[in-house]
């Protein structure tokens, strides 16, 4: 394998393993857009049923609103006959792993020039997190940030700086380490609020965006909120020191 790689390089054949968005003028990069039923095939859905739990999770096409519907029921009950499982109760969806290149190497999104994640969603009052996988030292590590919804039951755009995501491993904060924006693998949303009962979240799209686009979307959201007689608080940055001892 190493001989083949070396030979290809000597022949001038590139072994590119990233989808690069490397222009300074780039405003946004769609990571997932739920604009037709087939777009659901880009994602996988998981829940604690994988460990014998009793939660349900679904990602369906909502024809009336032309979007995806992430919904189900969360159960914290521990699986029967599995004494090694001490905690249960999670549901999530994420984009599928990108196909590897012909050299069996992982392929990443290279979004080095972009700074925020934006999502157009309509949710309930449950506690959702945005999950990002990038190249890290362990395959179980992901970066997470709370998806703050200020107007449940209405469509809204959430904007989160990539630098505010925290590296976690099975829900525990591991380190203050920024997302590797040049090697992003997947993006998704999870429910980890430790509450029994149904959940419902509609998702239109998830994008990586620039600083200028983030400012524009935030300003637009404030205007729309004021028109409805509401207010949107400033983005709540996570305190890294407190987060080190806090379970998400």
Image: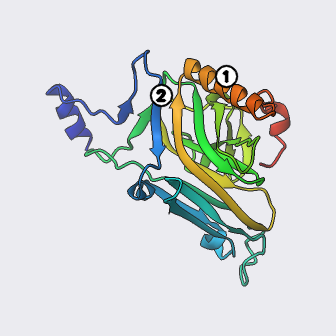
Q: Residues within 10 Å of mark 2 (few under 14, many from 20)?
A: many
Visible residue check, residue 140: no
Residue 148 place in picture, x, y as percent:
74, 41
Drawn side of residue 24 relative to residue 215, left or right: left
- Which of the 4 image quadrants contains residue 234? top right
Residue lying at 18% horizontally and 33% vertically, measured from the top left = 8
Nearer-the-camera pick, 127 or 97: 127
Q: Could you tell me which quadrant the N terminus lies in? A: top left
Q: With respect to residue 222, does 69 lie above or below?
A: below
Q: With respect to residue 192, does 102 lie above or below?
A: above
Instruction: Look at the numbered disc 2 and give the secondary structure of its residue.
Output: strand
Nearer-the-camera pick, 7 or 111: 111
Q: Rounded to the nearest whole Å, what is the CA distance between mark 2 and mark 1?
A: 17 Å
Viewer-nearest of discs 2 and 1: 1
**Label located before the other in sequence (2 or 1):** 2
Residue 167 place in picture, x, y as percent:
67, 40
Residue reaching furthest to the top: 24
Q: Which residue is under mark 2?
A: 28
Instruction: Look at the numbered disc 1 and give the secondary structure of its residue.
Output: helix
Drawn side of residue 85 relative to residue 38, left or right: right
The image shows a total of numbered marks equal to 2
Residue reaching furthest to the bottom: 81
Residue lying at 78% horizontally and 33% vertically, measured from the top left = 238
Q: Which residue is under mark 1?
A: 219
Residue lying at 84% horizontally and 43% vertically, measured from the top left = 245
């Amino acid at each position: 394998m190493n001989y083949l790689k070396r030979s290809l390089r000597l022949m001038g054949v590139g072994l590119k393993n990233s989808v690069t968005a490397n222009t300074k003028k780039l405003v946004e990069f769609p990571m997932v857009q739920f604009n037709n039923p087939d777009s659901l095939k880009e994602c996988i859905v998981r829940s604690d049923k994988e460990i014998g739990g009793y939660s349900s999770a679904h990602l369906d096409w909502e024809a009336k609103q032309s979007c995806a519907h992430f919904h189900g029921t969360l159960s914290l009950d521990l699986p029967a006959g599995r004494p090694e499982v001490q905690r249960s109760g999670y549901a999530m969806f994420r984009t599928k792993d990108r196909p590897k290149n012909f050299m069996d190497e992982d392929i990443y999104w290279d979004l080095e020039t972009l700074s925020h994640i934006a999502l157009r969603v309509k949710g309930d009052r449950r506690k959702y997190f945005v999950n990002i996988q990038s190249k890290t030292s362990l395959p179980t590590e992901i970066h997470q940030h709370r998806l703050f919804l200020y107007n449940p039951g209405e469509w809204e755009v959430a904007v989160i700086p990539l630098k505010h995501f925290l590296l976690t491993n099975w829900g525990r904060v591991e380190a203050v380490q920024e997302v590797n924006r040049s090697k992003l693998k997947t993006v998704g949303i999870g429910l980890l609020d430790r509450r029994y009962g149904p959940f419902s979240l509609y998702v239109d799209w998830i994008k990586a965006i620039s600083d200028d686009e983030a400012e524009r979307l935030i300003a637009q959201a404030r205007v729309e909120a004021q028109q409805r007689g509401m207010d949107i608080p400033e983005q709540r940055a996570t305190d890294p020191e407190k987060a080190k001892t806090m379970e998400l």
